Amino acid sequence: MHRPLPAGTQAPGRAVDLVIRNAKLLLESGLVRGGVAVSGDRICLIATDEHLPSANTVIDAHQKVLMPGLIDGHAHLHDPARLDHEDFTTGSRAAAAGGVTTVVDMPLTSPVLSPQAVEEKAKQGESMSIVDFGLYAGMMSADSVAVIPSLIEKGVAAFKAFTCAPYFANDGVITRLLSEVSEHGGHLTVHCENQGVLDEFKKDLEGEWDAPVSHSLARPNLAEQLAVHQTVGIAQQTGGHLHIAHVSTREAVKEIERGRAAGITITSEVCPHHLVFYRDEMNRLGPKSKMNPPLRSKEDRAALWAALLRGSIEMAVSDHAPSPAEEKDSGKEDIREAWSGVDGIQMILRILLSEGVNKGRLSFSRLLDVTCRNPARIFGLYPKKGVLQVGSDADMVIVDPTREETMKTDMMFSKCGWTLYEGMAMKGAPVMTFVRGVQVFNEDRTTIKPGYGRFQKMGDAGKVVED
Ligand SMILES: [Zn+2]
């Protein structure tokens, strides 16, 4: 794979550090043939092969697709809260193996809620991660409204709140949080499920908790629809950037579209599991298929693909939140006992290639939008990240859109030791991943020691630049 350019093709002048040639480059203007030159940690030239300089390392992409590394805008690396689930090293290895070069870590417990906590977590991540990362602050409450400006100062400009247990924030608190974000910048991400609906619907499932599908039936579409509607209504009053986490229903898509049409700044995201699986498969898949919001109907799944394609949903994110197998198996008799959350960080790109691009549901340029450009803009990292452009960080992934593979647990880098995607036949996979010009993943192994990843401060987060 690594070989010098043939004599006669080397441009005069100093050799650069890295050249990737003979690629199909996924640029903002579309797919074009050529290559990329890297000096230090940045892209210094994008050109047709004959105009690329000589380099210390030359990689022939064999006409595979070279695209920016993905930014996973929602992943729970569980570090240090649940080290038996995942940590910065294992989670970032799974990221690299999925073509993800920047992870935005989302806390579930031990949230970063002070400048000092940001510094400590950033330090911890930099000592363990192999890819770059940003940090979410959460779980936001009435007590944490006041810390928003000081966290933005520290480069943490994404805040998470819930409309449901176990981190319930009432409408008044959501209003205060959005007002603060409106004034100081950044964005508020809301997990939208109406607690009242959840409380009532679970009563109908008595005696049926041995069936995994009961988890989904107890959390109906209505719960998401109402919570999105309510939160969008709040944003209409406060202004500020509202982001809806893991949209899973067709009703939520409509509420978001209605709000946006009314001029409210709303962005949203979708997860690979909601794009692949559906409710009626839950009894077959077992407790591993439990997550919140839950798997929905086939009609919802189709609506999510359509929304992703037409731009109503801006980002694909993993919501990676695996657990040890025992915490899933504990739900075999009673699904309420199982951990909520699945693996996904290694699967986003594969799912979008296999089920999206290769099945005609997504174009390459839309793939670039939802995995790179939009998350970079939403988290204030654009154009440092999320684009192949001169001056940008050389975060890149070589993708083979035709590679066929069957997913198996031993291919996965997560600490959890299982995958919801076990046995799935996939077409399209990342084959090499680079972070700031350094290769971190090659074919089936990571190629760098923990401690390479760097904390990324969110700059002008919340400003979604329109073309
Ligand atoms: Zn999550």
Image (spheres, rainbow, N blue to C red):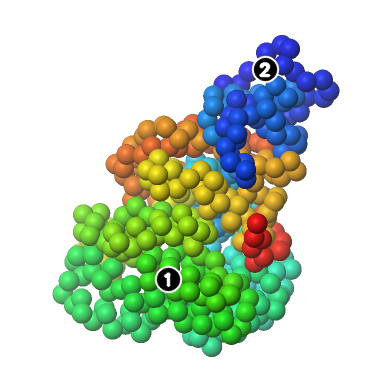
- Asked whether residue 142 appears in the rendered view, the answer is no
Left or right of 278? Residue 28 is right
Looking at this view, name the residue that lies furthest to the left. 207
Q: In this view, does 331 lie above or below 386?
A: below
Q: Residue at x 27, y 80 (%)?
A: 201
The numbered mark at residue 254 is 1
**Front-lying residue, 350 or 87:** 350
One can see residue 180 in this view: yes
Q: Residue 411 shows which numbered tag? A: none
Q: Is mark 1 on a helix, strand or loop?
A: helix
In this picture, residue 351 sits left or right of residue 296: right
Q: Categorize mark 1 by other alpha carbons within 10 Å: few (<14), some (14-19), many (20+).
A: some
Residue 32 screen position, x and y as percent: 60, 34
Dot 1 amino acid type: Lys
Q: Which callout, 1 or 2, points at the residue further toward the start of the chain? A: 2
Is the Cβ of the residue at disc 1 closer than 8 Å to that at disc 2? no
Amino acid identity at mark 2: Pro
Q: Residue at x 49, y 62 (%)?
A: 312
Between 344 and 307, the residue placed more toward the observer is 307
Residue at x 29%, y 41% (from the top left corner) = 423
How far apart are the two marked residues, 1 and 2, measured between alpha carbons?
53 Å
Q: Where is residue 125 in the image (x, y as percent from the top left)?
A: 62, 54
